[in-house]
Amino acid sequence: MITLVPLRRLAHARARAPGSALVIALALRDPADWRAVRAGASAAKVGAWLSSLRPRTVRRIELAGLASFHFRFDAAAGPGRGHDLAFDLDGRAFAQRLLDMPIEVTPGRAEALGQL
């Protein structure tokens, strides 16, 4: 049996906006959740979850030793927005939206997280 929990129960996120890209760093709260987050937060799934960004590409970089993932959304903002100070605020908002994404975990892990 599988239970869905919001990603924010498993990780926290930060964002930055270099140029016309958006980078979201996702750091796991517990490295034991690596497999669940790795399966549930693929580049394709994260791209679909944040489809309103309309990026050309979404790449996931895995940093297993740090229990972290980086997602790079290329040309996420469209032309010109990368130089707008408001874009950084948008980046932070998208990092928070990513944390709402549901991730499959075992019932035991959901119970440990207080989700059952």
Image: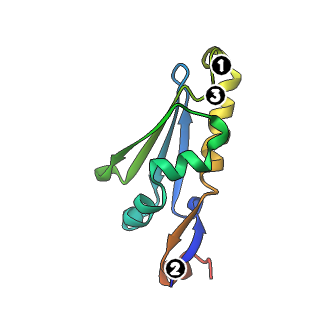
The quarter in which the C terminus is drawn is bottom right
Secondary structure category for the residue under label 1: helix
Left or right of residue 11, residue 31 in this image: left
Q: Alpha carbon of mark 3 to alpha carbon of mark 1: how far?
A: 10 Å
Say what amino acid the circle numbered 1 marks.
Arg
Question: Which numbered disc flags the more N-terminal residue, 2 or 3?
Answer: 2
Residue farthest to the right, as pictured: 86
Left or right of residue 63, residue 41 in this image: right
Q: Residue at x 60, y 54 (%)?
A: 99
Q: Is residue 50 above or below residue 99?
A: above
Q: Which residue is mark 3?
A: 88
What is the quadrant of residue 17 in the picture?
A: top right
Question: Dot 3: few (<14), some (14–19), or many (≥20) neighbours within 10 Å?
Answer: some
| Residue 103 picture location, percent across and down | 54, 65
Question: Dot 1: few (<14), some (14–19), or many (≥20) neighbours within 10 Å?
Answer: some
Residue farthest to the left, as pictured: 65
Say what amino acid the circle numbered 2 marks.
Ile
Q: Which residue is mark 2?
A: 2
Q: Alpha carbon of mark 2 to alpha carbon of mark 3: how far?
A: 36 Å
Left or right of residue 112, residue 93 in this image: right
Q: Residue at x 51, y 70 (%)?
A: 104
Q: Which residue is mark 1?
A: 81
Q: Alpha carbon of mark 1 to alpha carbon of mark 2: how far?
A: 40 Å
| Residue 97 picture location, percent across and down | 66, 49
| Residue 33 picture location, percent across and down | 41, 66
Q: Is residue 16 above or below residue 94?
A: above
What is the quadrant of residue 9 in the picture?
A: bottom right
